[in-house]
Each structure stands twice: as C-alpha cells, then as structure tokens.
Amino acid sequence: METPLATAVLFLYALCAVMIVGLVVLFALKIRNSSADNKARHCQEKYRDYFVYLQAHGEEEERLKVPHGEVTQSEKQIMQKKLFELMELFTGVHRQKLIWLCEDLGLIELDRKRLKGAWKWTRVDAAYNLGMMRSKEALPDLLQLLEKSSYDPSIFIIARSIARCARDTGDLREMVLLLVRYKKNFHELIVDILSDSQIDTAPLFASFLRETSTDLVKIGLIGLLAQSQSQPGIESALYKLIESEDKDIRIKAVKLVCQDVRYLTEQRVKAFMNHKDWEIRAMMAKAVGGLGLAGYIPMLKSAVGDSSWWVRHHSAYSLTALEVEGFAALCEILREERMGNKLQMAHEVIQEELEKGKRQAAATQDVEKQLQYNQKLHLYHKSYRKTISTVAALER
Amino acid sequence: MSNLVPVFYQLLTNMEASQSACGVILVACKNLSKESVEAIKRDFSPKETDSGETHFAYDKTKNLLGIMVEQHNLADTHFFALRVKDYLQESQLLSGSLLIASFPESSASSGQLFMRMMQEIKDLDGYGEIKIYDQRNSADAEEQTRILLVNHDEHVNEFLRIYLERKGYMVTVANDGMDGMEKYREWSPDLVITDLNLPILNGYQLMEKIKHHEASAMSKIVVLTDKRLEEDVQKSFALGAADYITKPFSPIELEARVRRLIS
Amino acid sequence: MRDFLLYYGVFAVYYVIAINSLYFIILMFSFKSIMGILKSSVYSRFQSLSGSRHVPPISILVPAYNEELTIIENVRSLLSLNYPKYEVIVVNDGSKDDTLQVLIEEFQLTSSEHMPMQPVLQTSKIRGIYHNPAFPNLYLIDKGNGGKADSLNAGINLSHYPLIASIDADSLLEKDALIRIAKVYMENPEETVAIGGDIRIANGCKIEDGVVSDIRLPDKFLPMMQSVEYLKAFLGGRIGWSAINGLIIVSGAFGVFRKDYVVKVGGYREGYPGEDMNIIIKLHKYMLENNLPYRVAFCPDAVCWTQAPDSFRILGSQRRRWGRGNLKNMIEYGKNMVLRPKYKVFGMLTLPFNILFETLNPYFRITGLLALIGYTLLDMTNAHVLLIYGLLNLLYGVLLGIGSLLLEEIAFRRYPRFKDIVKMLFYTILMFFGYRQIGVIWRFLGHIEYLRNNNSWGTMTRKSWQAENKNISSLEARG
C-alpha cells in the first residue's frame, strides 16, 4: 500500500524543487530584464544630445567623434543598437561615418572577439553586429562560422552578415555554396540575402547559369529574373536550360526569355505555346499580351481552347490586352464555338472586359478610350446576335 | 565684465579679415561669479580642445556666457557644446538653452550674424536644448518650405527632422496615416514625405485622401519606403506621387530630389 | 471493492504523472528552440523583407458569417498589412445580417459576374463575386450558407496565389504577422506545408483603429484564465511539438498553408467542427503516405489577437465543440494511423498522445478522482492518497505554467510590467481550482453530444459558430 505511492511522493518533492528553481529563474530574469530596460532608457537620455550631434553632422568629411569621457562597455552596446537603426536607413557617406564611429568605439574589435566566443548565441550576436558594421576583416571568420553551423534559423543571420561584409563575388559565391549544402531549397531567400550586398550580383547570377548544380542554376535564374536590366551573354546558357529536365528550371528559364522581346523568335514562341508543360504555355500566353505582340493573335485564339485552365485564362486576357484586334478574336470564338471550355472562358473575359471598359469610359474624358469601348461593344453585339441561344444558355 | 558683445564682435571681425574659421557657443547661465568663470576657463583649457585658441566672455546683465573656439567647424563646435552643457549642468550653472554657430557663414558679415544670434538666444526658451543657429529661418519664416513627414519608424522621423531642419526646411512629423492626414489638414505643407507601410491608414490610403483634399494642388508627395516591387512604384505614381525613394536611402539624394520638386 | 478503488486511484496518480511528464518533455523541446526563435525574430529586418520581391504572395481568406459590426474595421486592417504582395478574399457565408451590404457600400464594390474562377474544390453555390479596381487586392465572394470550411474552399477557388492564409473575421492580425510567417516559410519552402501563428487574447487590450495599441491582461476572470491557458498551449506546447514535427493543429484563427497540398487532400472538410485539426491531420497523412519530406511549422512571433468568450455559456459551447471535433477526428483518422510506424512521429507519438491524454483525458481524470473520493470515504485513514493526487495535479500543472511564463519572458516579453507576471502566476495556480475541472466536464459533454447527434453535424456546426460570433463582443465596440 505504501510502496506504490512512495514513488509518487518522491516525485512530489522533486517537483517542488524544480518549481522553486523555475520560479527563482523567472523572477531573476524578470528583474534583470527590467533593470536592463531602465539602463537602456537612462543611457538614451544621457546621450540624447550626442545622438542629435551624430545625426546633424553626418555629411561632413571628417569622422564623428566618440563621446567625451568614459563610456562603459554596456553603454557602448546600448548605443550600438541605436547606431544600427540609423545605419539601416542609410547608404553612402552617412552610413560610412557611423561605421567609422563604431570602429572608433572599439565595437568591431569587441565583436570580432565575441565571434570566437564559447557560446553559440554570442557568436550569432557578434556575426549579426559585424554584418551591420560591414566589417570586411571579419569575413573569413564569418564564412567559417557558417561552415560549422547546422541547419537552424541562425544560418540566415550569419549568411546575411556575410553578404553585407563581402569583398567580391568570390565571397558571395562561397556563401551560396555553403547555404545550398543544407539542401532545403530556400533559393528565393538566398537571392534576397544577396541583395543586401553592396556588390553587383548580376555577373554572379549569370555565372550560376552554367553550373551543373540545379540549386545554383535556380538561384541564378531567380536572381536574373529580379534584375531590371537583362544581362548580356547569357543567351546560350539560357537556351540550354529551356530543355532542362528539371521542370522548375525550364519554367524559370522560359520566364526569363519571355521578359525580353529580343529572345522571342517566332519559332520559339510557337514552340512555347505548344510546350508539354502547361505552365510554359500559360507564361507564353501571358507574355504575348504583356509585350503587345499582336502578330500572335491567331495562336492565342486557339490557346483559349487549351486543356489547362491557366492557359485559357492567360490567353483570353492577353487577347484583351491586344486592343480591339485581340478583342475581335475573342468575339470570333463566340461565333465559332457552340459550347465547352473555350466558349465559356471567352465569354467570361469578354464580359469582364466590357464591364471594365464601361467604367473607364464613364470616368474618363479621353475620347480615344470611349471610342474603343464602343467599338468593342459593337463587336460583341455582332457576335452576340448570332450566338444568342448559347449566351442565353450560359447566363441562365 | 559685460564685454561679451564688443569682444566677440571684434574677434569675429578679425577672423573674417584673416579668413580663418571659428565656432561660437552662447549659453544662458545663472549668475556666474568671477571665480566660476575663471574655473570654466581653466577646465576648458586649450590642451583639451586640441587645436585653436578658446575665448570666454560673460555678459553679466544678460547672464550669457559666450565661448569662441578658433579653427572649429560646426560639427566640432557642436561636439564642444555637448561638453559645455554637461559641465554647466553638473555644476548647476545652466539656466537655459545653448545656441551654436560657426563662422564665417556664407552670405552676411560675421559681425551682423553674431548680433542676430544674440537676439535669438534671448527668445530661446527651454532648458539644456542645443540649437544650431540658422541664419535663414530667423529672416524669413514665412517663405520656408514646409515638409510633412509620415513614417512609423521613429528613427527615420527623428533623423529626417534634424537633417531637413538643418537644410532650412520647416518639418512636422506624423507617426501613422491618420495622424498624417490630420496634420496635413491643419498645416497644408508644401511637400509630404510618406512611407507606404503605415498603421491605421496606409500610404496609399493617405495619398488617396490627400488627392481628394481641396487645397491639395499645391503639395507634392514623395514616397520613402521599403517596398521595392514594381507594382508599388506604379501604384504610387498613379496616385500622384512625384517621386519614389526606397530604403536604405542616401539623405543627400533625398534632399536633392526634394529641392528639385519644390523649386 | 476498496482495493479496486485504491488500485484504480493509484493508476490515476501515475497517469497524471505520465501525462504531465510528456507535457514537460515537450516543454523542454520548446526551450531548446526558443533561442533560435528569439534571435531570428530580433535580427531579421522585417521592415525591409516586407518590401522584397522574393517573398511569396499570399491569399488571405476571411470567412464571414454575420459580422456586419466588425467586418469593415477588420478588412481595413487586413488591407494595410506590411506585406509585399497579397490579396484579401472575404467570403460571405450566407449571412443573415448586412455583412454583404456594408462591405459593398464601404469599398464601393461592384458585382463582377464573369470573374473567372478555377473550381478546384466543391462548394455550395456562389451567388456573386464583388470587386473594385480601386482596391485591387480585395475580393468579396457571396455564397449560400455552407459553413466555415465551405467558405474556405470557395476562397481557395478564387485565390490567385500559391499560399493561403485562413483568418477568423473577428481576429486581428499584427501588421507584421504575415511577413514573419512568410520568413519561416522561405527558410524551407518546399517542405513546409502549413505554418501556424500565435493566438493571444485581446480582451483588456486597448484597440484603436484596427491596431492593438496597448497590451494589457484581461480584467475579467474567464478571459484571464484563457490568456494563461493559451500561453501555455502555444508557447509551452506548440513550439515543442513543431520542433519534432508532431504538430496536430494549426489554429483556424490564423494559419498559412500551401494551396497545392490543401487542394490535393481535398480541401477543408465540412460537416463537423475541428476543420482546423482535420486539415493538418490530412496533410500529415498525405505527406507521409507519399513519402514526401515535409514539416508543419509554428511561428510564435506572428501574433493574431482574438476576443475570448467571457461568459460560461459561450465558453462552454466552444469547448464542447472542440471536444466533439477532437473525438470525430480521432475516430475517423486516429484509428487508421495510430501506432503505425509508417506515420512516424505523427502516428507513433502525436496521435497516441492526443488520444490518451486529450481525447480520453476526461474519463481518466473524472473516474480517477471519483475512485479516490470513494476510497477515502470508505477508509478515512488513507486520505493522503487523495491529497497526493491533488497535489501532483496542481504542482505539475503549475510547473508547466511557470515554464511557459519563462519562455514568454525569454523571447517575447509582451507584458513588461512586473505585476503582470505575478498576476499570470496567480491565475496559473488558480486554474487548478475549478476551471480545469469544468473544462474536463465540457469536453466530456462534447463527446456525449457527438455520440447523440452523429448525423446532424452540419447544422450544429453552423449554429454554434453563429452563436459564438454573435456573442463575442466586437473589437470595435471595445476600442
């Protein structure tokens, strides 16, 4: 009778002990946190005028001066936070002067020491700080830290710091190689991280297109897709990628091709519009409208009858984007088809386009727009009369 | 010892003649005894200011302490003023604010500017504020360009207020879209610098409202934001933005664009 | 008889130890990942990320049933999130009030009769889709009443983006909640099928213009209890469960999903409550059966504020509904998946845990207590057994509560005042004197309702959803 419960009683004592420990830690932490808050507030008050000085003279040539008198280590670290907030806002000389100030305060040196600290999260803290201060000297250590890290959220903090401190594309490349090791496919995030670097990343992305690793190729494609200008000298690599076995690569490569009208020969457009991947057909259909290539109206018209909803959708919308001529092609579908997906999509898009046109015509003084709307309405009525039974059937 | 004005006037005229730079700090103090003025002189002896000679003068009737540091530009003078303030505050001799300037300023003669400074410090209230003397705003407050800053990030607001005020603009700050709209109505600024990510009303809604506000024909809108998508740029321009700047930004460029827009 | 009661009582004692020890282990997993969460939350520049081209676009689905009082405020708030590219799709689920009209009026929406919709999921009849080009990322679907899950499915059909977020119409998202979740997604985009956000209780907070401007603990008893309860469940529980990929639920009030997989598992299933747990179970099942690497993540720094029920009647109906939903899900999926090695952590740990300690919890607890009381009545000399049982429950529970308060203090610190922590601690203890017991009974009642009304789920769901939403006081009214 006593025995079965003895363990339970023992357990109770253990629970009490753990609970007391937990309570002590909780209150100690609470007190520490609030005293740290107070200290930070006090420090901010103390250096308020100094920060005004920093912000008022960010433009002149010489370095900003460190505060007069003794500045304690903890004060420096509180100041560092505020300095980081400012640094994040600026480019150019304003940021550079604050970086120099951090250097003069001894913060770079301090964090380089902490980067070799024993505790993991101290190292991550230091890595973040060094990234903010764009410390080129710390770069080899940062790369090493990333190399030793296993997959968890901290690797993104370190990677961003590397991007910020990078001296040349070689550093960035090394960072990317370390990141793709984890095999987690966070390609978009890598490209976002690379955009924090001060170095022009376009040549790096272009070089990735020729790699064999699909990860690097994807990163290269995503990077180039985000650039506003097209990168010269990638055509041959790009055309090869269109044939890639990886569907994702195929799609992204075609997307990149579709961004630039110079790549789009008639043969290529035809091939893409008849591609086995519906994504590629849809993308091409969308691009034709976006680029205003009125020559492909017949092709779009037949693609409104595609087996994929998305291809039908984009083809029909692209036709509306190609002025009255495209719209006329849509109306022809109404006449030619008797039922089915093609007719339905054409009908829906025509209706929406007319609604939109009506609103626009009412809101604008532009005679051109009003004229265009009337023309479209006329086209629609012409085909509508002939297919009245179908339309009525649809609308019921 | 009410020799502040003549002494400094003379010194400044000499400086101007020899084309050398200097900084001037005027401080509203409590009544200083001769000893305390001497103590101040001693504690700020030249060896600490590393370059140039330092002159002190005290005006007994106005309770004004003047300090002139040779070969100091405005930034150095400002930095020096931080120390002066701390010192006076610690010895409980400070009674009002500080006004700083560097000479030679561009246009008017140093002597005249100094006299205007003396005027301005009389009107300056507050305690322990360090104000940079701006020859422009004392002259023509009416003609200053008025800028409304709408941003949720207090660091941006604080910095741009300090920065743009130094460039001679009049600046009002709002923390969210609603606040921004209210200040816009009250103040009808010449130019609005707004973020797109704002609480309550976002940047687009704010622009929409400004567009439909009656007196809006006059004010230009500059978008300063983290958003880097083409869609956002397009939409901002469609809603009447005159310029679109993404963060992080170069303050110099921002000011140049602002100047272009209002000219 | 006496012996049997005693042995059963002893069994109950060890059951309590076992259940709490497992909770404790989960809590330890939470502690293990908390530093990573903290650092990644502090050191990510979410402002900058919210303007990035590389963030995936999200469709926010807002099912609304009789929400005329609060819907405008909430949609406005949703339209001004800090996020690069997203759309808000409000689904009016055949409301009986003016939800549809107030939305149309406020945003000057017009009916787009021919807006193309890709019907990938079955829903009840769509009456119309409304849109206004001046608010290009707002859509309103009007449809016949079909329940919450049906509304979500309709939203999926219209949605244009690869990720969907489901949000309750009476909840309030923090401005950067979505971008925080997106970051978790971006860190592992291919394997992440769902991410849950942290739900916190808004009662007592000051809410102005759709923004929680002053965070306070609730003043009333019941919301305060739930505040502590949510903190325990989300911080102590879900962080830990997500660390071992054993999360069984992503709260319906705020979660983000990959649309392709939601469609593949057939969308949300209507007919009984607990559709939020149901979709997660189905996702686990699908991914494991197809041998795809995946994770269901939890993002504790993405916060959604919600109004907690403040009367026993509504709270009771909510808890009974949870009990019903849980039992139904366990009967339907649990029995096929539990203890099958094929289903890995989910089948070997999460489900057994859920069945033993969540679903069957009321039976063990109630009978254990009754047995011990019975035994004590028969033999007063051994009253200490009852005491041990009670103390174990209390102390272990409080310990777990302290653990989650500690997590909160380490990573989030949303309640900075000292007296808040004392108050929360007090309620953590108080919870074991009455509140927990009532909760157990509600759950039990839920099971009874399930067994009695197995066939009439649809109507019951809608009724209670309606009852709850009507009675939860509006965010606006409190502002």
Image: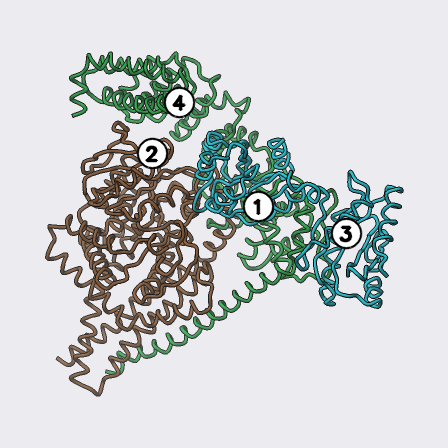
Q: Which mark is residue A364?
A: 4
Q: Earlier in the sequence, mark 1 or mark 3?
A: 3
Is label 1 in a helix, a strand or a loop?
A: strand
What residue is at 47 percent from the left and 23 percent from the top?
A238
Circle 2 residue:
C160
Is label 2 in a helix, a strand or a loop?
A: loop
Task: Please identify the quarter of the rendering in which residue C422 is found.
Answer: bottom left
Q: Position of residue A364 (x, y in %)?
A: 39, 22
**Is residue C256 positioned above or below C389 on the image?**
above
Tell me, by letter, which chain the rendering colours brown: C
Q: Decide which of A30, A132 is in the foreground and name it.
A: A30
- Residue A213 appears in the picture as rendered: no
Q: Which mark is residue B172?
A: 1
Q: Position of residue C316 (x, y in %)?
A: 22, 62
Chain of residue at mark 1: B
Asked if the residues shown at circle 3 and circle 4 are in contact, with their CB atoms under 8 angstroms apart, the answer is no
Closest to the camera, between mark 2 and mark 1, is 1
Circle 3 residue:
B118
Q: Categorize mark 1 by other alpha carbons within 10 Å: few (<14), some (14-19), many (20+).
A: some
Chain B's colour is: cyan
What residue is at 43 percent from the left and 55 percent from the top?
C213
Closest to the camera, between mark 1 and mark 3, is 3
User: Left of C53 or right of it: where is A135?
Assistant: right
Tell me, by letter, which chain the rendering colours green: A
